[in-house]
Image (cartoon, rainbow, N blue to C red):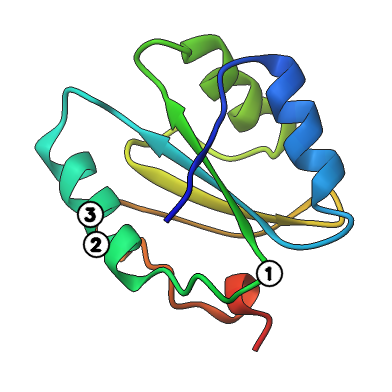
């Protein structure tokens, strides 16, 4: 799967703008956490490359200010790992830890 990097507030704005055309997944990943690594691997294994969603990966250790902006803009408690699905600039779904999955109607459009 191809992750798009999420490294700045400009990247976040671009991802939100893209959500008007197709679902956008924001995956907040801690590079220091084994649970986050497992959730990321599972998500990647489940990802269907034919779906229209775009997936953005945030290294929340390096880019904590972007992680904080996501929590503030979408009014969600910060968690790690965490997945948010954005469509039409609105939060459609979010999950964390072992509940993260690439198999969800808000991602696949099913």
Q: Position of residue 15 (x, y in %)?
A: 73, 39
Residue pushed farthest left? 34
> Horizontally, is 109 left or right of 80 in the view?
right
Which circle marks residue 41 in the picture?
Answer: 3
What SS does tag 3 mark? Answer: helix
Nearest the eye: 103 or 65: 103
What SS does tag 1 mark? Answer: loop
Q: Residue at x 48, y 43 (%)?
A: 3
First-in-chain label (1 vs 2): 2
- Whether tag 2 and tag 3 are in contact, CB under 8 A, the answer is yes
Which circle marks residue 42 in the picture?
Answer: 2
The quarter of the picture where residue 28 lies is: top left
Q: Position of residue 80 (x, y in %)?
A: 33, 36
Residue indicated by mark 1: 52
Which image quadrant: the C terminus? bottom right
Q: Residue at x 39, y 10 (%)?
A: 62
């Amino acid at each position: 799967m191809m992750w798009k990097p999420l490294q700045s507030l400009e990247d976040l704005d671009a991802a939100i703008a893209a959500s008007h055309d197709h679902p956008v997944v924001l995956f907040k990943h801690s590079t220091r956490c084994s649970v986050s690594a497992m959730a990321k691997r599972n998500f990647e294994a489940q990802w269907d490359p034919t779906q229209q969603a775009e997936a953005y990966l945030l290294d929340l250790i390096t880019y904590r200010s972007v992680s904080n902006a996501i929590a503030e803009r979408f009014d969600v408690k910060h968690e790690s790992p965490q997945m948010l699905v954005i469509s039409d600039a609105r939060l459609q779904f979010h999950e964390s830890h072992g509940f993260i999955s690439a198999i969800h109607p808000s991602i696949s459009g099913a």
